[in-house]
Amino acid sequence: MNSNMRNLAMWALVIAMFIMMISVSQNSFQAQPENEMIYSELVDKVEAGEVRRAEIDPQNAIISGELNNGQKFIVDSHPFNVENPQEIFQEYDIPYGFGEVQQPSRMMDLLIGILPLILIIGVTLMFMRSMQGGGRGGAMSFGKSRAKLLNEPSGKVTFDDVAGVKSAKEDLKEVVEFLRDPTKFTRLGAKIPTGALLVGPPGTGKTLLARAVAGEAGVPFFTISGSDFVEMFVGVGASRVRDMFADARKNAPCIIFIDEIDAVGRHRGVGTSGGHEEREQTLNQLLVEMDGFDGKEGVIIIAATNRPDVLDKALLRPGRFDRQIEVPYPDIQGREKILQVHMRGKPMAADVDAKYIARGTPGFSGADLANLVNEAALWAARRNKRKISMREFDDARDKVMMGAERSLVMTDEEKAMTAYHEAGHAIVGLNMPGSLPIHKATIIPRGRALGMVQYLPERDQISQSRQEMIARMAMAMGGRAAEELKFGYDEVTSGASSDIEQVTRIATAMVTEWGLSDAVGPIAYKNTDSNSFHPGIGRGSSISPETASIIEAEIKRFVTEAHETALKILKKKKKDWIALAEALLEYETLTGEEIKDLLDDGTQPRRPDGTSKPKLAAVPTTAGPVIGRPQTEG
């Protein structure tokens, strides 16, 4: 919006200057126009008494003056051989004098006439250049490279600033060594790959890795986005590619980083304009330039994408981007190191444990963790604290993962329903072998959920066992089972919809993908019909109706058994369940340790004001092994 307003203002200024110049020019010519006449016309006017005064230039035979109406006149008397031009003025008593008359120049008149046009053209070109970006992006440099050269002698990024991607850093270290000492490789006849493709989900640090390579090697770093090449005019992108590589060769050794290369490197032949499409012309030029690289030039191309499947195969062949480096989500050790990097320079309380925070953030990227630390700092600032504590990190994680707290007005019946529902999740989870330890239970609405139970793993999970899947399904069905037992079959609500969806999804995968059903066997039935009722069952595939019926029956059996297991546990642990629900109604949020103390010996949670309730009767409880991914039951 600001750019459009600026352009409109510039054009308005140009038009205003154009009108003003024309007006000034016309006024200057009309103010005192000079009337050229011949000598005989002058004599007639003198005799008629129309001349007010006159000026005679004997040397140039020029007579000038002014008429009674104020109009100037000028006469060239040289062709008439007038010896004494003053006699005619003396005869009729007209004032006259002698002096040199400045005769206007034809060239000066021409220059004065075209001067406004020259100024208008110059100002217009200046504004057009400014509107098109100025400098390298001006009107005369439309095809110039948009790559930005980053030289960071101070505060440069190094591998110490990149954590959680150890394998990717190891793959890029040889690139750094080549940029530092290329003769180490060339004297043995080795050729360093021209390009390296960083592949990974958004926010995992691909751009930061590329900058770290340049920082470690101490070389210039050119950065550009794939979309900066593509324009509506055919040939502009190819011109920018040529100019970018020419600049890189002048600054060698250096690194060219192309972010989101899938914007220009997609499969050719799939556009609406065939081989003449601008994007394909740009890609062709990129391929040609990469082929023209000599390994001794010291120019390395690093590109990043999160969609390697759409890239043209010609980009990935040897000699171009022949090295693909995976930049995955960090594991628990990687997350801990990333958190430590982002905690540098921030005042942390003594209770802050980066490893504990890393346990509760599986699937977080580097950008997510940076945002988590920033949110924790914001929470501490709102509370007027001097240091960031674990409480702020816990609140920040809840906000990032589930949304901010909602000030929702709930009736006593709805609040009780939510408390018993969440207590049902927690009790079933604590009594199922293969379940995860509980981190927190709350009935405070967040996001779309009215309450939730969070589970905290001790390590990242690569795969799941049958026992863990059955435990997850039973935990998810604990909420619906709790509603049935407490409020009756006819009073259950729609609050368990997401739980039922999660259980159905796990059961479907167990039957159709993971081969965990004895009735179906270890056979994968891939979904080929997006309109199928159950995800994973391909009704449009070649399976028979009998097999589809068996699959549906097995899915139903897994879901039904999970529901029945949850009912049995809640009936058996009814005291635990009711005690936990009442504690949630009282305190709204309970940590895993508070739940354990409450169920072990009846210790009530102690709040910052120091209040606590008397201990309840001790109720034994058992918890399964601590393995698997964290789950949140709503």
Image: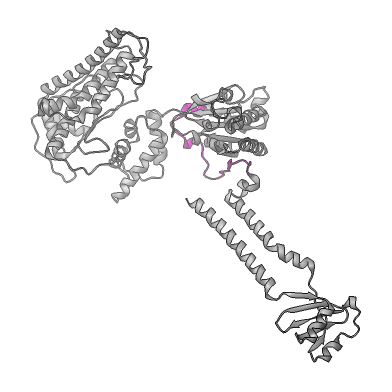
- Is residue 477 covered in magenta? no
Query: What residue do we see at 28% from left, 7% from top?
Result: 546
Report the span colored magenta.
142-170
- Is residue 163 covered in magenta? yes
The color scheme shown is: one colour
Nearest to the observer: residue 553 or residue 23: 23
Nearest to the observer: residue 482 or residue 211: 482
Q: How many marks?
A: 0
The answer to whether residue 625 is visible is no
The image quadrant where one finds the C terminus is: top left
Estimate the x, y position of residue 309 in percent, counting from the top left: 49, 24
Tell me: residue 270, above or below residue 81. above
Query: What residue do we see at 37% from left, 18% from top?
Result: 529
The answer to whether residue 428 is visible is yes
Query: What residue do we see at 78% from left, 72% from top?
Result: 104
Query: What residue do we see at 37% from left, 12% from top?
Result: 541
Estimate the x, y position of residue 64 in percent, counting from the top left: 79, 80
Image quadrant where residue 366 sits: top left
Image quadrant where residue 368 sits: top left
Estimate the x, y position of residue 297 in percent, counting from the top left: 67, 32
Nearest to the observer: residue 390 or residue 148: 148
Give the overall secondary structure of the magenta segment.
loop
Image quadrant where residue 528 sits: top left
